[in-house]
Image (tube, rainbow, N blue to C red):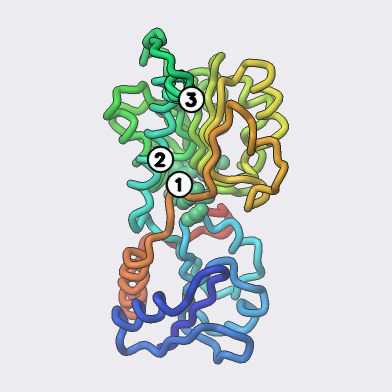
Amino acid sequence: MHITFCCTDTKPEPWIEGLRAALPDAALSVWQPGTPAADYAVVWAPPQEFLDQQPEIKALFNIGAGVDALLKCRLPPQARVVRLDDAGMSVQMAEYVCHAVIRHFREFDGYEADVKQGRWSYRKPRSRADCAVGVMGLGVLGARVARALQVFEFPVNGWSRSPKSIDGVRGFSGSGGFHDFLAASRVLVNLLPLTSDTQDILNRDTLSRLQPGGYVINVARGAHLVEDDLLALLDAGHLAGATLDVFRTEPLPAGHPFWTHPRITLTPHTSARTLRDESIAQIAGKIRALEQGEPIAGIVDPVRGY
Ligand code: NAP
Ligand code: GLV
């Protein structure tokens, strides 16, 4: 069995070492033009040339949860696309989102500014009941985030394509449930996959439907958000602020208004990182299962786009 590694911007040696330890009988390579065709590949943003040279490949293991970039390529028709299935990401996402929600809700930015001025001042406690958090996408990450937010007793709404039942989460589904979901939420957390249905979904119309003083947390993909619409709603006062981890262009270009906006907190696409050891263990386990003809979780439906 030949496994090849083709991940842009990722140092291959530790991955190869880890895969060798997990699958000692496999032949491993770091792909470059001319490398023989493989049975399996570990990929992130691979070049089209790589995909065109894989006539027999059984599965492409994406070392991230989101497969939007991979699905833009022309894929070998027989290849299964397999996403990372949590592998240590959901707990990171839960801590990031809870941190952002609590920081907003408890006005910690305001207190920090006061302290910097040497000011000992109190703000009026906000009502938790008035701070319903809407989680868009109730998959591997969204469901974990929705459960984590309940620990802090925020009312939690969830929106997914098909109806979902999560204890304590008010569920909405489909395009028919979208406007009611937005109207019931003040803080909006985006954890949707990027597909043709969800691109630009955070726009002037949808964000205007949030309760006044709304707050946006985008941790999915930059192309979900129409950036100028967010800025306009912040300026108009309908939105109180935003925490953004993902951007239409990454790295965020120098001079972009988000860098210095007083009500935008940003991080460099780091809310849930790929953890190498966990990912290798998961991928190796799935390769063993596939070799034995067993089913695996995390196979992407290329038509649905996630
Ligand atoms: P997932 O398990 O595939 O879950 C996707 C969820 O979105 C599902 O609940 C799905 O509904 C829902 N959905 C999809 N299309 C929809 C639509 N048109 N309308 C309403 N709901 C829709 O994905 P995940 O693992 O939770 O990851 C979500 C995304 O997070 C990834 O695709 C990636 O872009 C992003 N991500 C970002 C980072 C980061 O560091 N910033 C890290 C990891 C992932 P159903 O349940 O009905 O199918
Ligand atoms: C990161 O953004 C991922 O999709 O895993």
Question: Mark 3 highlights which residue?
Answer: 187
Looking at the rendered structure, the kind of residue marked 1 is Ser
In this image, 135 relative to 195: left or right? Answer: left
- Badge 2 density bin: few <14, some 14–19, many ≥20, Cα 10 Å: some
Question: Mark 2 highlights which residue?
Answer: 96
Residues 268 and 38: in front is 268
For marks 2 and 3, give the CA distance.
Answer: 14 Å
**Which of the 4 quarters of the picture holds residue 142?**
top left
Disc marking residue 239: none
Question: Mark 1 highlights which residue?
Answer: 271
Q: Are marks 2 and 1 in contact (CB under 8 Å)?
A: yes
Disc nearer the start of the sequence (1/3): 3
Residue 280 placement (x, y as % from top left): 35, 70
For marks 1 and 3, give the CA distance.
Answer: 17 Å
Disc nearer the start of the sequence (2/1): 2
Decide: is 59 above or below 177: below
Residue 207 placement (x, y as % from top left): 61, 25
Q: Are marks 1 and 3 in contact (CB under 8 Å)?
A: no
Q: Secondary structure at mark 2?
A: helix
Looking at the rendered structure, the kind of residue marked 3 is Val
The structure residue drawn at horizontal position 40% and vertical position 40%, both measured from the top left corner, is 96
